[in-house]
Image: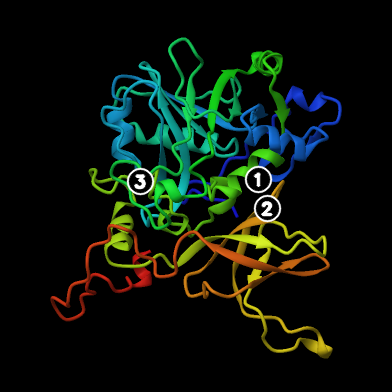
Amino acid sequence: MTAGTEDAPQAEAPTRTSPLLARPGAVAGSGPDAGVAWHYGDPTGEQRALEAGGAVVDLSHHGVVRVKGPDRLTWLNSITSQNLLGLAPRTSTELLVLSPQGHVEHSAGVVDDGESTWLVTEGSHAPTLAAWLDRMKFALRVEITDMTDEIAVLGEPRDAEGAEGEPVTWRDPWPRTAPGGTRYGPADDEHPGAHRAWRLVLVPRAELPDAVASREAAGWRLAGTWASEALRVEAWRPRLATEVDHRSIPHELDWLRTAVHLNKGCYRGQETIARVHNMGRPPRRLVMLHLDGSGHLLPVAGAEVRLPGGEPGPDGAAPVGRPVGNVTSVARHHELGPIALAVLKRSAPEDVELVVDCDGGAVAAAQEVVVPGEGVSVDRPAPRGPVARGITPRGQDAPRSMI
């Protein structure tokens, strides 16, 4: 599933092939990770090294947009979901660009270096994000540039902002609930992502091999996206290229933790954010699935998730249960085995084992709840009685027309 920009068609971003794919044993990634290595011959060892804090991941297929000018932060604050007023240099956050109906169109990691604001996003979205920003600048003193051809991204397992003299660095805030944010899932210190250290370092694209070599000289190893994606899925971390489709609202993915400020001024899509938070419930919910790996079947992104049981199929085929959602990301974790993220209907029961369609059969899947089915955040206002005929009181579902 991929996000779409409602006011303009998605531009086709070029697939940039990393020079590190020439390494012996490198296996190329596919889908949203095309252009970089899936692994370098030892995916399990690479994942263990990354989890232990001793590996670097080539993410040079990511996109980078730079915003310069004295009005950059106040302007970005006015058109996106995050409060960026007074953002200090080398302080990381993230933002969402929403449609007028509150659907997620873009996400970006945000860090300012004192002169420019840097937005790190999926490579396929960088041209469209830059074009949308350019259309929105009007007479303000801002300059938008898609820097993806000049800047490459490296991922490394460090929980630290970029220091003075280091390259521009974005530290992933997930899953720490930011000021003005809220959560549907567990408390920050109880969250599976609490111990996932992760940051993205921006380096000149021509210096990418040297930047990796310097880390290898310090004892780190080069890891592929097999490793980084497995740790992301384990941490329930949503990703624009995988968990988001044309209907996604941030509440469904527990993304109000880090990417939405509920108390800032007006911005596009804010009405849906407030209504669903205060009055409604997100119509879908993110889950992590523990997949049965005994049959060596693995679903692909987009695979249908079903309830067990149901009526037998044609000619006595095995029963097929009612569909309740779709897989969004699939990974092989070195300890947990095959795992996945999926987006389900809110009505799907939380206490049943699900079934996921695969090529060659289906596999059982145990759910780990990310966004509870009740759809209530920890700071949702208490319900009130009806105030007038036809008005939905707080605590009841918002009409679907709202979202």
Among numbered discs 3 and 2, the one appearing first in the sequence: 3
Amino acid, disc 3: Val
Taking the spot 40% from the left edge, 18% from the top edge, the residue there is 113
Query: Which quarter of the image is occupied by the C terminus?
Result: bottom left
Taking the spot 64% from the left edge, 32% from the top edge, the residue there is 61
Q: In which quadrant of the rendered view does residue 379 lie?
A: bottom left
Q: In which quadrant of the rendered view does residue 51 lie?
A: top right
Circle 2 sits on which residue?
336
Circle 1 sits on which residue?
230
Query: Which quarter of the image is occupied by the N terminus?
Result: bottom right
Could you say whether the residue bearing mark 2 is in a helix, strand or loop? Answer: loop
Q: Residue furthest right?
A: 24
Image depth: mark 3 or mark 2 in front: 2
Q: Residues within 10 Å of mark 3 (few under 14, many from 20)?
A: many
Q: Is residue 96 above or below residue 341?
A: above
Circle 3 sits on which residue?
260
Amino acid, disc 2: Leu
Residue 99 at x, y percent in the picture: 40, 51
Taking the spot 37% from the left edge, 53% from the top edge, the residue there is 183
Q: Residues within 10 Å of mark 1 (few under 14, many from 20)?
A: many
Could you say whether the residue bearing mark 1 is in a helix, strand or loop? Answer: helix
Among numbered discs 1 and 3, the one appearing first in the sequence: 1
Say if residue 35 shows up in the picture: no
Whole-number angstrom distance, CA of label 3 to CA of label 2: 31 Å
Badge 3 vs badge 2, beta-carbon distance below 8 Å:
no
**Coloured how?**
rainbow
Amino acid, disc 1: Ala
Image depth: mark 2 or mark 1 in front: 2
Residue 89 at x, y percent in the picture: 36, 20
Q: Nearer the viewer, residue 31 or 87?
A: 87
